[in-house]
Image: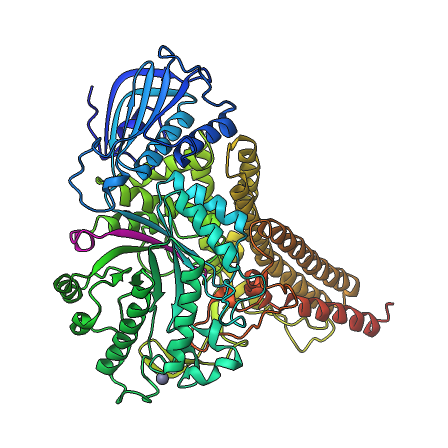
Amino acid sequence: MTTVHSPLVSPLRAAGYAVLPTPRETRLTGGTVQVHADWRLAHRAVDADDIAVRTLQSRLEEEHGFRLTGPANVNSPTVELAIDPQSVETDTDDDRQTQAYTLDIGPNRIVATGVGPAGLFYAVQTLLHLFDSGQGRLPQGRIRDWPRLAWRCIHWDTKHHQDTLETLRRYLDQAARYKINAVLFELEDKFAYPSHPVIGAPGAFTPAELQSLTDYALERHIQIIPDVQSPAHLCYVLKHETFSALRCDGSNYQICMDDPAARQLLFDMYDDLCDATRGAKFFHVSTDEVYYAGICEKYRRPYNPENRSLTLIDFIGAAHERLTRRNREMLIWLEYPLLPEHIDKLPARVINGVASRDPDQIRAERRHGIRRFVYWPTQGSELVFPRYFAFDPADGARNAGRLSAARDTFFDPALTDEAPMGAIAAAWDDAGLHNESFWLGWAHMAQHAWTPTAVSVEETTATFMDIHYGRGTAESMAAAYRTLHNAARLYEQTLEKLPSKVRGPAYGHPLWKGPMPRCDTGMMPPAEPRLPNDTAVSMPPVFGKRYAEAVARAPAAQDDCERLIEQLHGLLGRAQRNRYAIEVLISLTTHLRHFFRIVADVAKAEDSLRQAALAGKQGEHRQARRALIRARDTVRDTLRDGQAVFEGLRAVWERSQRPRNAPADGKFFVHVMDDVKDHFADRRADLTYLIAPEETLNLGDWLTQIDETIQRYDAATNRE
Ligand SMILES: [Zn+2]
């Protein structure tokens, strides 16, 4: 029985299995086979300590309580792992070929054969997915599989936080389950550059630590791609006074990239990272958003679109020469301000990490032979949780959500007809989301970049949940993600962009230099309390009026969050893995619930103050005083709840991350903000950026004012 691949349900999902990415060809013959400990493990042309062999045995032991220990007897039922370069004909002549594998599952014999070691490793991952979702009962038949794109890359952005090494090793194992084979590791100051020790943040990874992580990844057929943000986005370097002379036009955002000393500094950093990632194939020099290339006019003038593009081209050429000497293939973001007509001046071997839909650029890249990755952001500037699912923005048309956009992006002919070498799922740290929230997006990228025909967004999500959290969790986990997603959207829609009280104007707009006013994300504070016997002044519901809609929705939103927290606690009992991720989801939901409580409580306290004013006007002093006390208690309790919630969140997060920018070994973090960018997560050096929006309400001051009002009222009405 050959199962036809339906766009609605893949054959394995239809048979009740959870495999992600969905294999290219599946032929099921109808029966099943139960694998036990008395099955024998055999290998052909494979070392006994190959990662594929070890992964199979250790995962069976950790997650199912047994290893394959059957006797070496020809009659024993057998799982055989093999490497055979001739086993699959893929018609590809690139890195995809060695990733191909077959999996033959018969009543007494299972054979997993890789064209190369990576192929065998992926055969084992598929076998384990079948094993998990079938609880040891496997479907008989044949799977023949290799990737649609050679490189499936996820983005670890550690701009504003640092995961522990233990976390990153866990992430590498997790990535391997989804056949992800590259990590764009945006290190910024989280690496202790030996050539310039001032750049590394306290606790930054040492060269030995990074090398150990690189080796761990390589063993799992994953390339770590070090990414040095340069020559723009360089505040983490240029904020240090010792490099101030290298700032272009005085801005700490961008280095003066024609300056020989500037190039030396960056190339020293590249060298340091090449030394600490031996065995890696790629290097990303970023070239992200180099808005102002050559703006100082010290080396090339005038500053205009053409010279701006040429300045960047010169720099890329020099960096490419340097990295070629280190045997690295160089990735860049090939984008503004590079002009399409200058693309033929680039080294032809550079790889564009952000494939463009612009036909002029596509033609120029094709002519010049530039290879490309399809790029899709898992997250951008959204707060708390990615915009995965459809939602209705406060203004504008319904947004289909990022998961739907991922499928559209990875099957967009304009992006994929040119045979991209890979796909990148970016996950920016700009808004400081927890990395555990990115796995759903990363898995969707892995699905679309591996499987040649589109698998539905919903199936991919359900299969991800069954794999990530364990068999049978899909419905509840997917529902939990949606509730959290919707709560995060309500949070975003309630917050406003207010003229900044914290930061001065930016150095420029992406398209020009000139002061750009900035905004704080937050809410307008409530009205100041009035003495109830001050009959001249009324007490308007400032907050209650401005945020009427949010106030009306706050009680239901709190209920939703509470139900979600209960649901997640229930899932902690059922999940077979990644329980920590569920704890992170609980921390996020608790954080949002507290926010909705604030909205409700501030409106309630404001209302109590109004009642106090009303009673005071009528000479009902006792009633007025009681209303003042109610307002005070409400605000005080909300603030206390906020403290407890934040400490709870911090305790969860700091199990996977270092305490944010905490001193280490006598070194202190230098917190200077970027002259151009204004990342939500960079507003504070510590984790309190998460509560910065609610702090714009100044509730602590409001509480003090209410307390003083009570005292003054008591004095005026002779009550002690
Ligand atoms: Zn300059």
Horizontally, is 148 left or right of 670 in the view?
A: left
Residue 529 horizontal side relative to residue 516, left or right? right
Q: Is residue 401 visible?
A: no
Image quadrant holding the C terminus, namely bottom right
The span shown in magenta is 413-429
Give the left or right position of residue 307, taking residue 75 as reference: left
- Residue shown at 39% from the left, 41% from the top: 176
On screen, residue 247 above or below 3? below
Q: Which quadrant is home to the N terminus?
A: top left
Q: Nearer the viewer, residue 716 or 345?
A: 345
Q: Nearer the viewer, residue 106 or 71?
A: 71
Q: Is residue 428 magenta?
A: yes
Q: Residue at x 75, y 71 (%)?
A: 709
Badge count: 0
- Depth check: 541 or 458 in front? 458
Magenta span contains residue 232: no
**719 or 701, nearer to the observer:** 701
**x and y percent of residue 38 in the render?**
45, 15
Residue at 26% x, 89% y: name it. Answer: 302
For ligand 1, the image quadrant comes to bottom left
- The reply to whether residue 105 is in sight is yes
- Give the image location of residue 132, x and y in percent: 42, 27
Q: Is residue 711 above or below residue 422?
A: below
Which residue of the protein is positioned furthest toward the top in this rendering?
A: 75
Q: Position of residue 91 (x, y in %)?
A: 15, 40
